[in-house]
Image: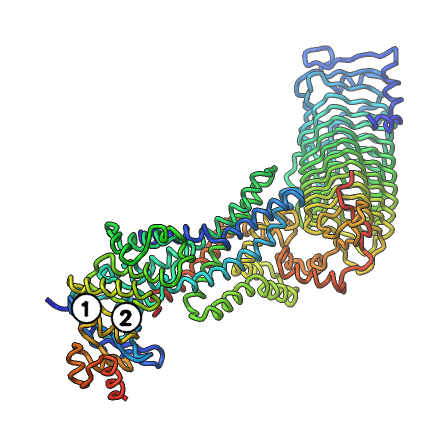
Amino acid sequence: MSAARKVLGYSLSNLLRNWWVLGYGLLFLFLTDALFRFGGGGPRVAASLMNVVLIVIPLVSVVFGTLYFSNSREFIELLLAQPVSRPALFTGLYFGLALPLAAAFAIGVALPAAAHGGAGLMRPVATLVAAGVLLTFVFTSVAFLAGVHFEDRAKGLGFALLVWFCCAVLYDGLILLVATMFRDYPLEPALLALTVLNPVDLARVLLLLTLDAAALMGYTGAVFGRFFGSALGIAAAAAALLMWTAVPFLLGLRGFNRKDF
Amino acid sequence: MSAPLVVSGLRKQFGRLRVLEGVDVALDAGQVTALVGPNAAGKSTLIKSILGLVRPDAGTIAVLGETIGADPHYRRFIGYMPQAARYPDNLTGDEVLALLADLRGGQAPHDHALRASLGLTAETLARPVRTLSGGTRQKLSAVIALRHEAPVLILDEPTAGLDPLTSSHLKELVRQRAASGAAVLLTSHVMAEVEELADVLVYLVDGRVRFSGSLDELRLRTGQRRVERAIAHLMREVA
Amino acid sequence: MPWLRSAAGTAWVLAATSTLSAQQTITVRAAGPVATIAGALRQAGDGDRIVITAGTWALDSPLVVAHRVDIEGEGMPVLRGRGNHELLRITANGVRIRGLAFQNVRTSYIDDLAAVRFIEVDGCAVEDSRFEGTFFGIYLQKAKGCRITGNHFVGGGRSESGSGNAIHLWNSTRTLIADNEITQHRDGIYLEFARHVDVVGNISEANFRYGLHFMFSDSCNYRGNRFRSNGAGIAVMYSKQVDMTGNRFEDNWGAGAYGLLLKDITDGRLEDNRFAGNSTALFLEGSSRLLVRGNAFDRNGWAIKLMANTEGNRFEDNTFSGNSFDVATNSRSNASVFDANYWDHYQGYDLDRDGYGDVPYSPVRLFSLVVQQNEPALILLRSFMVDLLEVAERVMPVLTPATLVDQRPRFTVPK
């Protein structure tokens, strides 16, 4: 897959000069720094960033990814007219976008965190960065899927935003509804399953386990804590996030392979 | 020796729309073949099929005697100049050229003379692509297509957007390539250009080849001296 | 040390023992004239001193101390029980025990067997001793004027039902419990029907039930203690005039664990305590007229749970930071006052720069009510959707108590 690496390389040097990507990184940099300066301690900063990470990262990844893909259409056609295989091109383009986005975020958060330091900061920040990076990969996959399947940029964007809205907002409404309607039943296993199925919720609960450990030690929380602390839980969480990255990616790749440009 | 590019029985359907209905075309070495036809005749689908951008439903395409399949290797033998290219905004012209050379593998081509003859200076190529005019980007596309001295050249409206001087330079380059043995496929809306460059004309309507032959044969058949009139004649004939 | 003042009630005991002129010292040594502790106790009269030398002294039945003696260990001798019995039963006033190690009082499901039991004494002291694997450690039964200081307790049980309390007071008054370290007992310190007890500077951690547990014990005082990782935290019930200051309540995790549980407590004072990392830091039920001031609530699940039947409590100058929920309540009405606390969730502004936010702060979140009624919904904590609901509730309060507000939320952490 050396062609994939070449495409990745060009994509990186293109996007690392992109003002949106730089601005995205700077946004996290200034935000994190400001939170440290005005917001107080490390766990507090991590908690404030958590909401941003869970909302902004999926949104930016999915919107920017969809637009990037459709804006690159002509160049993709030119590249495909070269002796390059479609999987190689798709893979190179995917990582060429996901990596700069993930790096912009990770550096934007990690630099101020390292500068301000503080004990007990490593774990929440590391978890935060890991969650953000995973979400970037998931939602870039979704964006590429949208880009491949919708010729019309507006439709692709609409689809991408719909997926984001469902994951970030609507899905939790559903969980709350389920939790309220079936409150007389032992709900924990069902809610666990529902959580694992949504990448945003999964990332959120993994962050909760480091930030709100005390609150989660009630009966319900203990169930969650035990699950995600167990080998099974870690495997399930990893599998779910991997699945969320791989399934849209593979669907997108399949579409890309079969697509008539 | 067989023709460098042979298309036979090519069919393609998009949904219910039949775009190509059994197209047979052969490009001979050393000749410029003009692909002409009204809008939506299937010209771009044919070109995209050859480039592997569109997967045909039936029929075969052979490049240098090899029938093409999933292996992208054959595209080493094709130089392609798209109608209107767009490049990644933040890369410089040099970087775009480097990437495309890199993707082909092998040694970077010596294309300085080519760049110079198309009026691409080192200074221009050092700038980000987004700052370049449409015409300059078109020159970049021409360099990408021509510099590998590929045995098959596919040029989609190559002179659109070029100034007259560069346009005539480009035409000269295309003639030189053909003279040195390349098989050239050209689409153009400018019939004067077709008349000036082409040896052979393929006329495509509704996904079928309605005429295929030398310009002289075309004149003979339609009784028109000028290609533009001859084409118009063909269009009426088909309708 | 401030606790010395409150220990004044017991001071006369010590004064009396140390100034007796006819004091006789009896040394217990395996190869000596007095070879058993029982023998020493038989010889000793009021005011005598018994020194037990290093070694393990096995006991088959409890030793009864019926005279006012000082019993001191030399090189931490071990008093080791052999069966289901207590080790020392003290019925005389003013007995002082110092520097002994007590081992092996087996678990009994019938009797509260203790290593050292004082029965209806006036004045007693247990100092610098160790209690290892004893079911109950020190049991004060209708005693008054005692000092329990500097002892170390490591319970032997493995579960709540299989272990007893380290320091157990029943019907006792004027007692000082200071600087003890307690772990692996059922309750670290247990007080029932006790009055005027000072609990100062103890460390009670990793006990199976409560680090400190007291019921029906009025006018008691708890200062500078550290309670960590106890199964159910600390419980204070059915008592009046309780003073708790400068204590630390930490890492009490679990559904039924509380940093501090107050049930039916009136006229108490809670000042300058620190609550950190508890599932529920402070739980109030049926408690009234408490002053809760200057405490720090940091990284707890719920900082304060206020049940409907509490009233007339004041919460002021407290610091709330990093808690998942600041205040939760099961009632729409509220009869307590929150004033001038620092809340890190507060998002108001201070235009007049008087140090207090210009808009009131409502610490009760809608979501805490949801979770109260429906615990599994906790999994939605910090969800964007929940934040949206929260905003809606702020704009138009329907479910959260409108009167539970801090009118003067502090802008900076109080000193």
Q: Quadrant of residue A201?
A: bottom right
Give the camera-side residue of C365 and A133: A133
Position of A247 relative to C411 (above/below): below
User: Which quadrant, please, contains the C terminus of chain C?
Assistant: top right
Tag 2: residue type?
Answer: Ile
User: Hey, which quadrant is residue C248 in on the image?
Assistant: top right
**Residue B58, horizontal then vertical, whole percent:** 25, 75
Is residue C294 at all visible to an observer of this figure? yes
Same chain for the residues under marks 1 and 2 in the image: yes
Q: How far across and down, in percent of the image, does residue B213 sit?
A: 17, 78
Front-most of residues B234 and C309: B234
Q: Which one is earlier in the sequence, the residue at label 1 or at label 2?
A: 1
Q: Name the one closer to the observer, C88 or C74.
A: C74
B148 with respect to C242 (left or right): left
**Can residue C231 be seen by looking at this rendering?**
no
Left or right of B238, for residue A42: right
Give the residue at mark 2. Answer: B47
Q: Amino acid at mark 1?
A: Leu
Label 2 SS: helix
Contact, mark 1 vs mark 2 (Cβ under 8 Å): no
Q: Secondary structure at mark 1?
A: strand
Residue C374, by quadrant, is bottom right
Instruction: Classify 10 Å Cα crowding around label 1: few (below 14), some (14-19), many (20 and above).
Output: many
Chain ID at mark 2:
B
Question: To which residue does mark 1 refer?
Answer: B5
